Image: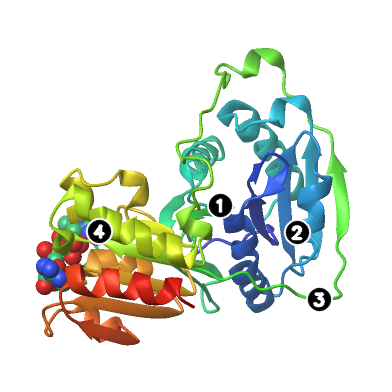
Amino acid sequence: MGEFANKNIWVFIETDEGKAKSVGLELLNPGRMLAKKAGEELVAVVFGTENTAAVAQIQEYGVDRIISVEGAEYEKYSFDAYTYAMTALVNKYAPSAILIGATNNGRDFGPRLSCRLRTGLTADCTGLDYDAESGNVAWTRPAFGGNLMACIMCPDTRPQIGTVRPGVFKKAPVPDKHADVISEKISVPADKIRVRLVESIREAAEGMVNLEDAEIIVSGGRGMGASENFKLIEELADALGGAVGASRAAVDAGWIGHAHQVGQTGKTVGPKLYIACGISGAIQHLAGMSGSECIVAINQDPEAPIFTMADYGIIGNVFEVLPALTEEIKTL
Ligand code: FAD
């Protein structure tokens, strides 16, 4: 194990139209735990053209400092600009670890940054702890198709970098703490930006809830039997003001898009209520939804593994239970 001068736990706060994305705010929670155990500070780092709104959001989560980098080149995610700026910050401040949300952008940014800094990256983590004996962050991630959980450390280089799945940690506001904001001006030379984002098109239809931020999710699996039967899932989700999720079996069957997939190769969600309909409860599905506060399972097989995880189980046929449930909820 090396001896390092690097100090402090950084959390990269990804933004969307000037607002902090949920995952960054979630990561401030384990970030604070790591900083406390390591006896270091928790620092949030945010890039954008105008960070006032994002900084105000971050202030609610008890960080020790906020590093805000503003400039036209940071308006949208650009791996060239972001990697350039973060490398400059790391060289200046020498953090011990950087936590990045495993969003599409984070999954691009993390590896590029770790490569630029000649350090390691643990991708797609679902757990974090601090190993006091070695002084390393202990990153946990699924391995071998979700059948094993691997604990990975980065003992030889700093900073330690990892991407962490959205929805794994809960946001935990800390009242009455105000962090210093350090404004850094980092101009990225034009020739360093090789790729520019010309246009981004939102996949979600108007009014559709983002799965990772949804408080209620109704998910359908192979038990729904056909694409057209997913309307029963949509109707219940509509009645509850929730979002529609799915198992991989339903996605692979072409009944619904991959953006709806919950699980190890889909999204990790942590809603208040998760209703699994015709889903058996394979380990790879549970990996994406076991953090839900309340799980309701509807399945005709009383032996289905999903019932071991469910707070409430309805043993029955989805084609009978779902319409009845939707009707009942509409009358409330
Ligand atoms: P099934 O396992 O076939 O279960 C269908 C259930 O529906 C059964 O329990 C049955 O009793 C019930 N049912 C049938 N008809 C009715 C009815 N009329 N009324 C009520 N109940 C009924 N899966 C994911 O979901 N997400 C992932 O991200 C994911 N990633 C994976 C990654 C890897 C590397 C691998 C190997 C697998 C992954 N899987 C993932 C697949 C996973 O192993 C399962 O195959 C999948 O979750 C099964 O989906 P299911 O529960 O819908 O289907």
Residue 231: image quadrant is bottom left
Q: Residue 100 carries which label?
A: 1
Callout 4 crowding tier (Cα within 10 Å): few <14, some 14–19, many ≥20: many
Amino acid at circle 2:
Ile
Q: Are marks 2 and 1 in contact (CB under 8 Å)?
A: no
94 lies above or below 319: above
| Residue depicted at x 31% and y 60% | 233
Q: How far apart are marks 4 and 1 (CA)?
A: 26 Å
Callout 3 crowding tier (Cα within 10 Å): few <14, some 14–19, many ≥20: few
Q: Which mark is residue 247?
A: 4
Q: Does the residue labelled 2 lie within 8 Å of ligand 1?
A: no
213 lies above or below 319: above
Question: Which mark sits nearer the N-terminus, 2 or 1?
Answer: 2
Question: Which mark sits nearer the N-terminus, 2 or 3?
Answer: 2
| Residue depicted at x 86% and y 75% | 176
Question: Which mark sits nearer the N-terminus, 4 or 1?
Answer: 1
| Front disc: 2 or 4 | 4
Dot 3: what SS?
loop
Amino acid at circle 1:
Ile
Residue 227, percent from left and from top: 20, 48
Q: Nearer the viewer, residue 159 or 72?
A: 72
Residue 300: image quadrant is bottom left
Q: How far apart are marks 2 and 4 (CA)?
A: 33 Å
